[in-house]
Image: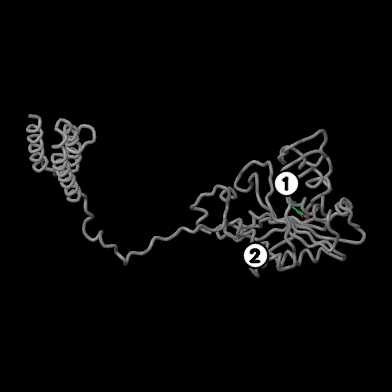
């Protein structure tokens, strides 16, 4: 009795499997669940019922059930191939005449490019490149450079203090300039010395279009016998021509720094077509002859040696070079800005 009904059930299922239409992806999924579903699919159900048969009849019916299962799988596979969305028209054949996709390669930051250009000029003039720490003690950043104890730069308003200590001499600061590298070099070398020291410096200043809390400087130092202010002017003039062209206009203005005597500042003429005077002077560096007190602090004999020093602002020079009018642009990392260099 059971045999008959199982045979009948199998025939009925064969009808259903061959006749059920599959005309959409949803119908295909419904078909799969209805006939081939692991838990309650109709084929699964019949496979379970094989146990109702006497053992000798099971292989025959089992074989027929397996064949029916393959049939259901074939219908499903065929329907899926038929229903699969096909790409239309020419998209199937790639258009080999289309231009390739450009790789975005990135570029060096304008400050890096300017720094490298400055370093290259001085290397050609025989200067060695050295570096110093960005965290400095009072001695290197101030005292050895002949800053008096009450100098305003020792004030919280101008300097980032990491540690203040009981007296000013114990202070630890973010260096406010690259001049401490002069001290570090002279402490371990005797003249002749001819170095530049590029690097980051930090100042506790109100941020505006012309000042930022960090910026870059390149320090220069030349110590030997008979070094003169004339040598300094010559070197800086060669530098300005290398960076801004043969016709560059530059001027030396008397100034004051604790670590040089005499001291000067150097301005470069910035031509501006819309400006009433046709442009304006832009300060790019401070310089001077190394103060005898600085030599004494590092154990170099000021009677025997003289030297010049300078410290230039890299951002200022980059602004002149590229016509940039806001220092903050260098630090925003806006790709639309950076892409232009
Ligand atoms: N350190 C100075 C500053 O931060 C710049 C400077 C001036 C450096 C004169 C020097 C120098 O070496 O001789 O503004």
Within 8 Å of ligand 1, the CB of disc 1?
Answer: yes
Give whichever of 116, 5 is nearer the camera.
Answer: 5
Upstream in sequence: badge 1 or badge 2: 1
Q: List x then y, in percent, for residue 89.
A: 21, 59
Residue 278 can be seen in this image: no
Residue drawn where x is 84% and y is 53% of the image: 187
Q: Residues within 10 Å of mark 1 (few under 14, many from 20)?
A: many
Q: Quarter holding the N terminus?
A: top left
Give whichever of 120, 310 is nearer the camera.
Answer: 120
Instruction: Spot the residue most to the right.
Output: 303
Q: Which residue is mark 1?
A: 176
Q: List x then y, in percent, for residue 130.
A: 73, 57
Q: Residues within 10 Å of mark 2 (few under 14, many from 20)?
A: some
**Cα distance between the residues tagged 1 and 2:** 25 Å
Q: Which residue is mark 2?
A: 243
Answer with left or right where residue 31 lies relative to residue 284: left
Q: Quadrant of residue 321?
A: bottom right
Instruction: Spot the residue most to the front.
Output: 56
Q: Which mark is residue 255?
A: none
Give whichever of 99, 247 is nearer the camera.
Answer: 99
Is 223 rendered above or below residue 155? below
Secondary structure beneath dot 1 equals loop
Residue drawn where x is 80% and y is 45% of the image: 142
Residue drawn where x is 46% and y is 58% of the image: 104
């Amino acid at each position: 009795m059971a045999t008959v009904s199982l045979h009948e059930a199998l025939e009925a299922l064969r009808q259903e499997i061959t006749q059920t239409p599959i005309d959409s992806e949803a119908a295909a999924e419904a078909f799969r669940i209805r006939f081939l579903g692991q838990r309650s699919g109709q084929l699964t159900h019949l496979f379970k019922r094989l146990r109702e048969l006497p053992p000798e009849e099971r292989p025959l019916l089992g074989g027929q059930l397996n064949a029916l299962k393959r049939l259901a799988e074939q219908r499903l596979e065929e329907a899926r191939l038929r229903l699969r969305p096909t790409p239309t028209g020419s998209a199937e054949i790639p258009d080999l005449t289309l231009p390739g996709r450009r790789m975005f390669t990135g570029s060096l930051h304008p400050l890096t490019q300017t720094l490298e250009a400055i370093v290259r000029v001085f290397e050609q003039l025989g200067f060695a490149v050295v570096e110093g720490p960005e965290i400095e003690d009072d001695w290197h950043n101030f005292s050895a450079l002949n800053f008096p104890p009450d100098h305003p730069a020792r004030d919280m308003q101008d300097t980032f203090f990491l540690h203040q200590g009981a007296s000013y001499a114990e202070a630890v600061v973010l260096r406010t300039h690259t001049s401490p590298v002069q001290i570090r070099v002279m402490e371990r070398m005797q003249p002749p010395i001819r170095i530049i020291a590029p690097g980051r410096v930090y100042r506790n200043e109100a941020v505006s279009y012309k000042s930022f809390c960090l910026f870059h400087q390149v320090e220069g130092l030349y110590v030997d016998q008979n070094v003169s202010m004339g040598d300094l002017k010559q070197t800086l003039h060669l530098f300005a021509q290398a960076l801004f062209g043969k016709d560059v206009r530059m001027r030396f203005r008397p100034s004051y720094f604790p670590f040089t005597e005499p001291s000067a500042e150097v301005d470069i003429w910035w031509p501006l077509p819309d400006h009433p005077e046709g442009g304006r002077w832009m300060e790019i560096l401070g310089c001077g002859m190394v103060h005898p007190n600085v030599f004494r602090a590092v154990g170099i004999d000021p009677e025997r040696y003289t030297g010049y020093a300078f410290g230039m602002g890299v951002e200022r020079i980059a602004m002149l070079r590229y016509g940039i009018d806001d220092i903050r642009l260098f630090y925003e990392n806006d790709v639309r800005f950076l892409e232009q260099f």
